[in-house]
Image (spheres, grey):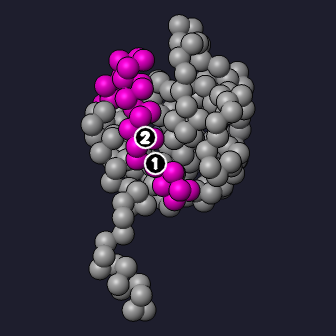
């Protein structure tokens, strides 16, 4: 239910080992904090990133985000994923956290697509090409795992379209900019 972006994606362990890092250079807890999510961030280096999930109650009513930072299991141990694609997974779970803080505690298709959208949006707000990163993550999952989307999250096309719908990933409309200047 709450678990994971879906059974795909890989290796946040790469964050520690990979030379190429995102321009913001934020740690995982800092990324989660950036979104406004106030849940405890619990990292587990024995779980792969696809095991990451948000829970509204990890005990005593406290929400938490669990992030797998461990290696991919066989037979996927050699599959490489970029830092930014792993970051997209972190931001997806953070989006669930923010939605929960805003009163949503359901995790169906529409909520998942909202998390896809906002994950991309957070990355765009950090100066990254969030929608394209999200696209690349999903295409990677298709190529590696044959992932085509799923009923709980939406089709691959639904999910990519959700990412590209993030307002933060689109140029601001001209009229809005003029309004801003007038005020
Ligand atoms: Zn989700």
The residue that label 1 is drawn on is 130
- Is 8 part of what is drawn in magenta? no
Q: Seen in the image, is 45 located left or right of residue 32? A: right
Q: Residue at x 27, y 37 (%)?
A: 157
Q: Is residue 66 above or below residue 113?
A: above
Residue 134, position as x, y percentages in the image: 43, 40
User: Splitting the image into 4 quarters, where does residue 52 fall?
Assistant: top right
The answer for how far apart the CA atoms under marks 2 and 1 are is: 6 Å
Q: Seen in the image, is 120 located left or right of residue 173? A: right
Q: Is residue 173 above or below residue 170?
A: below
Q: Which residues are magenta?
A: 124-151
Q: Nearer the viewer, residue 133 or 114?
A: 133
Residue furthest top as drawn: 75
Q: Residue at x 67, y 43 (%)?
A: 28
Residue 182, position as x, y percentages in the image: 39, 92
Residue 114, position as x, y percentages in the image: 39, 50
Helix, strand or loop at label 1? It is: helix
Would residue 129 be visible to someone looking at this image?
Answer: yes
Tell me which secondary structure the magenta stretch mostly adopts.
Answer: helix
The residue that label 2 is drawn on is 134
Would residue 93 be visible to someone looking at this image?
Answer: no
Q: Residue at x 33, y 40 (%)?
A: 159
Q: Nearer the viewer, residue 91 or 179?
A: 179
Residue furthest bottom as drawn: 182
């Amino acid at each position: 239910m709450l678990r994971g972006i879906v059974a795909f994606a890989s290796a946040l362990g790469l964050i520690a080992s990979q030379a190429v890092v995102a321009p913001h250079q934020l740690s995982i807890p800092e990324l989660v904090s950036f979104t406004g999510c106030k849940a405890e961030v619990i990292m587990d280096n024995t779980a792969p990133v696809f095991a990451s999930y948000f829970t509204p109650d990890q005990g005593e009513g406290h929400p938490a985000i669990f992030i797998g930072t461990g290696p991919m299991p066989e037979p996927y141990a050699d599959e490489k994923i970029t830092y930014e694609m792993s970051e997209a997974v972190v931001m997806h779970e953070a989006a669930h956290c923010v939605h929960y803080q805003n009163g949503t505690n359901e995790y169906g298709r529409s909520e998942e697509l909202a998390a896809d959208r906002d994950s991309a949006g957070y990355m765009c707000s950090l100066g990254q090409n969030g929608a394209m990163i999200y696209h690349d993550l999903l295409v990677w999952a298709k190529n590696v795992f044959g992932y085509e989307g799923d009923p709980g999250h939406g089709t691959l096309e639904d999910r990519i379209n959700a990412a590209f719908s993030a307002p933060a990933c689109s140029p601001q409309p001209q009229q809005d900019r003029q309004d801003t200047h007038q005020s």
